[in-house]
Image: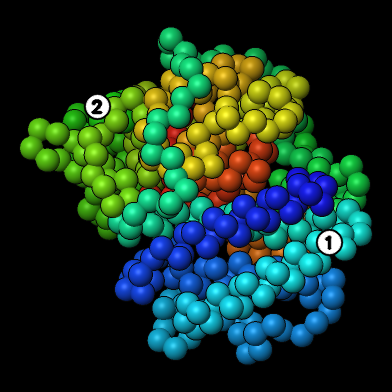
Amino acid sequence: MNTKEEIAQELEIVDRRSRELLEDLSDEQLRVPYERGINPPIWELGHAAFFYEYFLLRELGGKAARMPGYDEVWDSFEIMHKHRWAPGVVPGKATMLDYYSRVMDESRERLEKLADPHESYLFRYCIHHQQMHIESLIWARQTLGYPAPSFSDQASRECGAIGEAGDAFIDGGEYFMGMPEGVQGEKGVPFSFDNERPGFRVELEPFAISKTLVSNREFLEFVQDGGYEKEALWGFGGKCWLAESEREFPNYWRWEGNEIQVRKFDEWIELPLDAPALHLSVWEAEAYCKWAGRRLPTEPEWEAAARGAEGQSFPWGDDMDAGRVDMDGGFYGIASAMAFAEGASSSGCLQMLGTAWEWTSSQFLPFDGFKIDMYHYMSVLQFGDHRVTKGGSCATCSSLIRNTYRQAYYPSRTDAYTGFRTCAR
């Protein structure tokens, strides 16, 4: 997404998907109850528009606010999360859509005058930011039990499967992690967010990592063996989370007689046993690992398994091919964990991009030499108390993701599309 034509195409996609995620919701559905992991949909889209206005249009044109008096409403670091639900604070749907449309139209007009790599970088940053909010709108619909997005693909999209799971064995040695340092926007410098830079070399011992994500079938064995009741499997944080959540099995599961079902948006379906287990906290992942005699990979290990010794941008090479992964619309997460063989890494690991954000054992911390980017709060507020997840999910936009991308989630999160794979101890 470097040329004006590529940026324009991606801009149309995020605009269309954002509108579709909002426009089929009734007024009653738009009045969503307070949930810690989501935002009111109207605020979400207004915030995306504000990002274009503040970091792109004002940066390049110096114009005044397009919606005077609302900067502090749309700015996520000025308005507290709970206040986004306060009566009279966020405007109505029609007012917000008028603002959103004006900003997007101005952005299209500005794109026609694209002058240099820095402007291209600003557009990409704003588009990628909106892609993140598209994903959060998708998991909000899952959280609330709303219908699946109109552009979702309910079919099981598979590209061929491996015949046997097991571990991939990764040689010890030196691997490059993260993205090379460079001035973002300069020609020839690949796009990245500040928390991916500056890249560095890391020395790893040999290790074995599972080729597949942990499946529902495997996690069900843990549940049926009393995994949620065995205190010895849970660390301090996990025990606190269990006491607070009163969880006895994964989020969105239920038992209907002898059948185990999982909720996908507004539908309950039979649990797809061979599909990856989703919507899991890191505490559940760690308890499973202890039960199975395994462990979570560290972030450097995960990245080494995905990139290989060559340091590739994607598991299969240096060019994105969305047909190799489960993302861009496959929000049901029903494909087998052994599917998408065409997207395997050189080590033989499957679905390292797409399907599920994969928990690691690493805290979300800055790399040595970290420098804050143009959006000061992109990373710094998450450093220290979040875990690193890698790889994107079935709800992630394919043009956003790459092997080096790092997403920060609280360890207790189960609303996002989180899963995991394991390493041998």
Whole-percent x, y for residue 41 in the image: 46, 68
Q: Residue 292 at what x, y percent from top left?
A: 34, 24
Amino acid bearing label 1: Glu
- Please indicate whether residue 77 sits to the left or right of residue 156 in the image: right
Residue that numbered label 2 is attached to = 221
Which residue is the site of mark 1? 112
Query: Seen from this angle, which residue lies furthest left?
Result: 257
Residue lying at 29% horizontally and 30% vertically, measured from the top left:
272
Question: Which label number is shown at residue 388?
Answer: none
Q: Nearer the viewer, mark 1 or mark 2?
A: 1
Residue 188 shows up from this direction: yes
Residue 151, above or below 33: above
SS label for mark 1: loop
Q: Nearer the viewer, residue 102 or 411?
A: 102
Q: Nearer the viewer, residue 108 or 243?
A: 108
Could you tell me which residue is drawn at 48 percent across and 17 percent down? 160
Q: Viewed as shown, does residue 350 lie left or right of 227?
A: right
Residue at coordinates 57% horizontally, 37% vertically from top-left?
391
User: Upstream in the sequence, badge 1 or badge 2?
Assistant: 1
- Dividing the picture into quadrants, the one containing residue 332 is top left
Q: In the rendered view, would you say 263 is above or below 292? A: below
> How many dots with numbers?
2
Alpha carbon separation for disc pair 1 and 2: 56 Å
Q: Residue furthest top?
A: 163
Amino acid type at circle 2 is Glu
